[in-house]
Amino acid sequence: MCCFSDIKSIPRCRPAAKPRENVIAEAIHKACKGIGTNERAVIYIVVHRSKRELREVAKAYKTLYDKDIVEVLDSETSGWFRKALLYLFKTAIAEPSRMHLPEKMLTRQADIF
């Protein structure tokens, strides 16, 4: 008798959990939905994420809601809070640029000394 003779006793696989960036994008959407914005929730969500995570959240938000997260936050917030949020997301979304080195560092070491 095979150990798999009773198929019903084998536990079924659970469906895969949602990707983390989708959960975060949904939380931001929920915080901005309706009248007013839950600024505490948005602050908590955004400041605890790295730039890479914010970039992934922005992509997930675009695929889930077909809206740009920067435009949503721009319309839902105001003042210095808006500027700070937009700065965080815009710097995260922007492609990492090449680091600019001073001319001295680009020349050969023998030329410097």
Image (cartoon, rainbow, N blue to C red):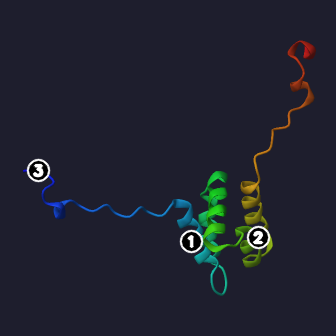
Q: Residues within 10 Å of mark 3 (few under 14, many from 20)?
A: few
Graded by Cα atoms within 10 Å as few (under 14), some (14 to 19) or many (20 or more), the crowding at tag 2 reads some
Image check: 91 left or right of 12? right
> Which image quarter is the C terminus in?
top right
Taking the spot 16% from the left edge, 62% from the top edge, the residue there is: 9
**What residue sits right under mark 1 in the picture?**
27
Instruction: Kindly give the residue lying farthest to the left in the view shown.
Output: 1
CA gap between label 2 and label 3 equals 64 Å
Q: Mark 2, mark 1: which one is toward the viewer?
A: 1
Q: Position of residue 24 (x, y in %)?
A: 56, 65
Which of the 4 image quarters holds residue 53? bottom right
Amino acid on which the number 1 mark rests in the picture = Ala
Per the image, label 1 sits on a secondary structure element best described as: helix
* Residue behind mark 2: 82
Foreground label between 1 and 3: 3
Q: Is residue 103 found left or right of 92 in the rendered image?
A: right
Q: Mark 2 belongs to which amino acid?
A: Arg
Kindly identify which numbered label has been placed on residue 36. none
The spot of residue 20 in percent (x, y) is 52, 60
Q: How many marks?
A: 3
